[in-house]
Image: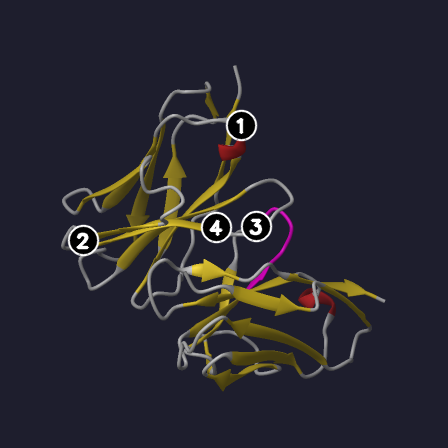
Amino acid sequence: QEQLQESGPGLVKPSETLSLTCTVSGYSITSNYYCGWIRQPPGKGLEWIGSIYHSGSTYYNPSLKSRVTISIDTSKNQFSLKLSSVTAADTAVYYCATGRGYWFDPWGQGILVTVSS
Amino acid sequence: DIQMTQSPSSVSASVGDRVTITCRASQDISIWLAWYQQKPGKAPNLLIFAASSLQIAVPSRFSGSGSGTDFTLTISSLQPEDFATYYCQQANSFPLTFGGGTKVEIK
């Protein structure tokens, strides 16, 4: 069964770095999959953060590019997100997802990350 | 960046109704559009990809159409489990962008 699971701290202090990992099970992310991070502030819509291909090529949302790093560890079938210098505006549910094209299926269940001191 | 505009932002409908949601791209994206359904507290679920291809296990009452800049998602006969928020996403080029969402509510 294809599954993704986000993990990481649910609370991050302002100005610090948010770090999340997505663990994929049931298939290999090296099988021509794009791996992506998407977030959703409480009560709001979806925002694409960035994607990484199994080769390591990365693509970022220009609005976040200066603060985002996405990496991949094919040996562990995981990919990760780092978002630096966070503020309250970065409070959101963060989803990881994969796809063979530029659409996403399946998705992880999501993890709520709150930025607060 | 390609802007995605969904309409309406919300719609009230009854079980059995036909519901149509539209999505407009700010530039030509060919057929590279996806539709998702999201229920409260859950991750989005892919319904349609490449504008009109139904994802595996998605009921046939869902259909998608369009190309270029104008797209539609149609639910032919609304069922109780279809009350949710629907999002379009352009899958043509990075940066990927989503529409603002359409909430389908019970009338």
Q: Which residue is mark 3?
A: B42
Q: Residue at x 58, y 66 (%)?
A: B5
Q: CA distance from mark 3 to mark 2?
A: 29 Å
Answer above or below: position of B76 versus A101: below
Instruction: Give the position of the N terminus of chain A as an image quadrant.
Output: bottom left
Could you tell me residue A86's position as x and y percent?
Answer: 43, 27
Report x, y in % for residue B7.
66, 69
Mark before the other along the chain sequence, 4 or 2: 4
Horizontal and vertical percent position of residue A70 = 27, 42
Judge the density around disc 2: few (<14), some (14-19), many (≥20) Cα neighbours within 10 Å: few
Q: Amino acid at mark 2?
A: Ser
Element at label 2 = loop
User: Comparing marks 3 and 2, which lies closer to the viewer?
Assistant: 2
A12 or A62: nearer the viewer: A62
Does B64 sit above or below residue A29?
below
Q: Can residue A26 be seen?
A: no
Q: Is residue A97 magenta?
A: no
Confirm or deny contact between disc 1 and disc 4 (CB under 8 A): no
Going by the numbered disc 1, the residue's amino acid type is: Ala
Of the residues under marks 1 and 4, which one precedes in the sequence? Answer: 4
Asked if labels 3 and 2 share a chain, the reply is no
Please name the residue shown 40% across and 59% down the image: A106
Closer to the camera, A37 or A1?
A: A37
Return the disc, 2 or 1, that comes first in the chain's sequence: 2
The residue carrying mark 2 is A57
Magenta stretch: give its range. Answer: B36-42
Is B39 a magenta residue?
yes
Give me the disc on residue A88. 1
The circle drawn on residue A107 is: none
Q: Are marks 3 and 2 in contact (CB under 8 Å)?
A: no
Q: Chain of mark 4?
A: A
Residue marked by disc 4: A47
